[in-house]
Image (spheres, rainbow, N blue to C red):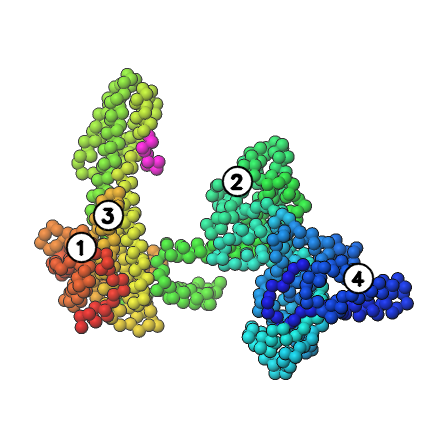
Amino acid sequence: MSNKTFTESPFKTLISFHKLIDSLEEIAQTDVDYRSNYAKALLKEIEPFSEFRDGIEDLNLIKQQEKLIHNLLADLFPTALTHNEIKAISIPFQNVTFNFTERFKKILQHAGITFNMEIRDFDKDQFYIFNCILILNAYYGQHFDFYTPLFYDIPNAHGIIEHYKILYNADFIEVIPTQNAPELSQDDIDLLMNNHDNIALWKELFPNESWILKGFGIVSLIDVTRENAISNLKSNLLKSEKSHNKLSISFESIFRSIFKIPDLRIGFIIYNEEEEKFTNPPHEEKEMKSFILNNLEEMDCKNTIYGCSLETILEEKKPIIISDVQQFSKIPGNERLTQHLALQNIQSCIFAPVIKNNTILGIIELVSAKPKELNTINATNLDLILPYLIDTLERYKTDMQHHIEAIIQREYTAIHSSVYWKFRREALKYYQTSNPNKDYIFKEIIFKDVYPLYGQIDIKGSSEHRNQTVKEDLKNQLTTLIKLFEGQKTNDSFVLLEQRIFELQTFDKELESPLKADTEQQIQNYIESEIHPILRNTKMDIESEIVRQNYFESLDEKTGMFYHARKKFDHTMSIINKKLAAILDKKQIEAQLIYPHYYERFKTDGVEHNLYIGASIAPTKPFDNLYLHNLRLWQLQTLCEMEIEHHQLKATLPYQLDVTSLILVFSSPISIRFRMDEKRFDVDGTYNARYEVVKKRIDKANIKGTKERITQKEKITIVYSHNAEENEYLKYIKYLQYKNLLEPNIEQFEIEDLQGVSGLRAFRVKVINNNLESIAHNNTYQDLLNEQN
């Protein structure tokens, strides 16, 4: 017998059979001999136990008189139904149960002695309120519908959780108030009706044990395992992506409950219709492995799988059902598939397509380690499941398309979030006014009177370094080939080998001079067409053969050439660009808080960025030049941080590269236009083109009257035209010197005249690279003004 677990209740519970005894007494007075005699005999047997009528408080009496109570309840628990019905005596909402049917006993035996039968998701407050509502309905004549489905979750002998719906019969229960029970008015009842969750109010109006619950209830259980599992499946499939961390575990538990197979495992693959491939689920669902693909990421649907065609699924759109893998292996042509399944301890399986509108969305895989557990009969259970999988997969594919479009927009187009509103507005106009018989003319996206900010952090001498690594790889390859040919002892093609050595040495000498545009291609073509055929077709001694093998293993797979020095250089370039771009992107998030502005950056031989700020980009926000000054200070400070980051990174790089930094100051507002053909923003108008000209030519410019570049490693160069710009940036420089980010010395010079541009001047100041703690992430132009005051 189970005991109740809740200590507080509006009821003092008295288990009583008084209503049943009253019924027996009526039967004893009837003229039907066998019924009357039976009732009289039973009444005589229970006569010594007045508690049966008055109420049992000591539950030990129920244990002691278990057989007598069973006989007393015989009419309610027919022997003929005991192996079919799941029924017992119980007090509603309490875990007090006894007089179980044989089927109920067997269920509890399979659950184990440690199992504690408790109502699912039922807490002490719910218990208290449910009992109070029972009083309101039974004693005060209310009709509150407080029916909430209640369930027991009970494991079976195989460990599969089975679910049972609870039904109560309260015909033999009586609700009686004690002296401590407050008399409720209609106002009190209305107050309770509108405060269901106010447990303090319920306890105030129904104090602990202020009522007597006299009698007994009958609890009946209905096996709803399959229905519950399907409901859980729907809930899981409707979860958000963030809630799917343990989806596979839930899936396996749900499917095991539906199929009643304890070792059932679930897999899944997605069908890519465009490429006609089966692929694994996305990384969020990696726990949902595929047994068909196993360790493969994808598979071409046109190919056969381990010797067995997927034709049944792809063309006939029917499931593959293998009830016994060993028997299946005896059919010619199935050997490789059965071996593949056996390696994963699969002895029976179902591979069923998930289909919507005659198109396969994916394949659900059910496998078991036992033969004949899965078969064509229980495969019909999939009919209950597949409709929900279809909806989920269709939603997944739609979401995936949205994500792909978002990625394309983020990575491959120039529609920044700050200007997205204008594109959306124009698209909305098109959507609302579009007419199949009328061509819609899209308005140009233009932002007028915006202030540009341009900056770059460039790899110093990248072209020279690239050429140097190319020459290094070519020379190493030529030297290796020359040594290989010179070490050849055989007389075969001796004259030809001498000629090839001479030609390789000639190329090697050419590399002593500056690299020409076509030198690399000439040498590559020569080696591929003239040298490699000889190496592959000439017999060599053991020592030379080892050298030849090492040579071919050293070649890059894509180019067929030595790629060692260039690989270090390219890898270093990639590391620098990725790291510096990440800093800029992260800092940009902070900069948008200053004032919304357009931002774009490019990775070339370094990282460039364009910023445009003005009222037309954020028309709902008032614009002031303070925001422009804020952004200029942010830009200068961010370049300092990027310089410091590179300095710290430099020691760990596979190839030593320096960087130079530059800012172009342009104080006149310009207009930018989105160019539909290029899908990017560009400056608009002839006058504004001067800004673009300066941008493209300034980093290669020299100091006027010298051959010295205006940019130098570990220094930031600030190019400007007007005295106002000079005074503004001197303030920023002095402020960052005070913050210990820039060194005290400031170089100031004029820049040589560029084609169509003259009168440019510049500052150049060195970054302090040894003081990371001095970086102030959130300093603004207003901070600068405050500190100066």
The answer for how far apart the CA atoms under marks 1 and 2 are is 59 Å
Tell me where the magenta segment starts and ends, as one range. Answer: 552-560
Label 3 vs label 4, nearer the camera: 4
Q: Which residue is mark 3?
A: 650
Position of residue 205 relative to residue 509, above or below, is below
Q: Is residue 145 visible?
A: no
Residue wearing tag 2: 302
**Type of residue at label 2?**
Lys
Task: Please report the residue visible at 51 percent of the width from the left and 53 percent of the height from the top.
Answer: 246
Q: Main secondary structure of the magenta part?
A: loop
Residue 653 visible? The answer is: yes
Name the outermost residue toward the top: 491
The circle on residue 715 is 1
Q: CA distance from mark 3 to mark 2?
A: 50 Å
- Which quadrant of the view contains residue 629? bottom left
Q: Position of residue 354 (x, y in %)?
A: 58, 50
Q: Name which of mark 1 and mark 2 comes first in the sequence.
A: 2
Sequence-earlier tag: 4 or 2: 4
Q: Return the disc, 3 or 4, that comes first in the chain's sequence.
A: 4
Helix, strand or loop at label 4? It is loop
Residue pictured at 67% horizontal, 66% vertical: 92
What residue is shown with label 4?
A: 75
Decide: marks 3, 4 in contact (CB < 8 A)?
Answer: no
Provide the secondary structure element on which disc 2 rests: loop
Place residue 374 in its image quadrant: top right
| Observer-nearest of 121 and 571 | 121
Mark 3: which secondary structure? helix
